[in-house]
Amino acid sequence: MSKENRETILGEVKKIICNDRNEQYGEPEDTFSLIADYWSAYIKHNCLPPDSVGDMDVIGADDVAIMMVLFKLARIESSYRESRDSYIDAIGYMSCATDIAHPASEKEKANADN
């Protein structure tokens, strides 16, 4: 693989997660938090013994991003590594997971805007 190809791949990921998906769905961490709420409710109701977790959240936004990476890895495996889009999506989800787990400081945000 060449440096140019990696730059192309990262450019595609950046376009998807910073432009296309943001315009379509809003900020990923907001969507992932909502998904986490839905998944937590489902797991509490359908997968865990009654009263085993109380009001605690089972899944957080960062878990959703990581679980979506796992979903994409399964897609890659089941498509015999043919699905280029799943690779791009997995990189995008991991980027979102990193951003949620390690948010940029205000100084880093200001430097990125310049």
Image (spheres, rainbow, N blue to C red):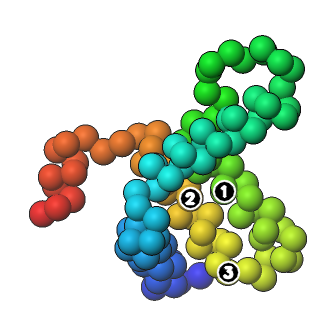
Q: Is residue 6 left or right of residue 107?
A: right
The Cα–Cα distance between marks 2 and 1, rounded to whole angstroms, is 6 Å
Amino acid type, label 2: Tyr
Residue pointed to by mark 2: 93
Residue 62 in sight: no
Please say if 36 is above or below 57.
below
Q: Which mark is residue 26?
A: none
The Cα–Cα distance between marks 3 and 1, rounded to whole angstroms, is 14 Å
**Residue 19 at what x, y percent from top left?**
38, 73
Label pair 2/1, CB-CB below 8 angstroms: yes
Q: Residue at x 40, y 57 (%)?
A: 27
Q: Residue at x 77, y 35 (%)?
A: 43
Q: Quadrant of residue 78?
A: bottom right
Q: Is residue 38 left or right of residue 20?
A: right
Label pair 3/2, CB-CB below 8 angstroms: no
Residue pointed to by mark 1: 69
Q: Tell me which label, 3 or 2, sits earlier in the chain.
A: 3
Residue pointed to by mark 3: 84
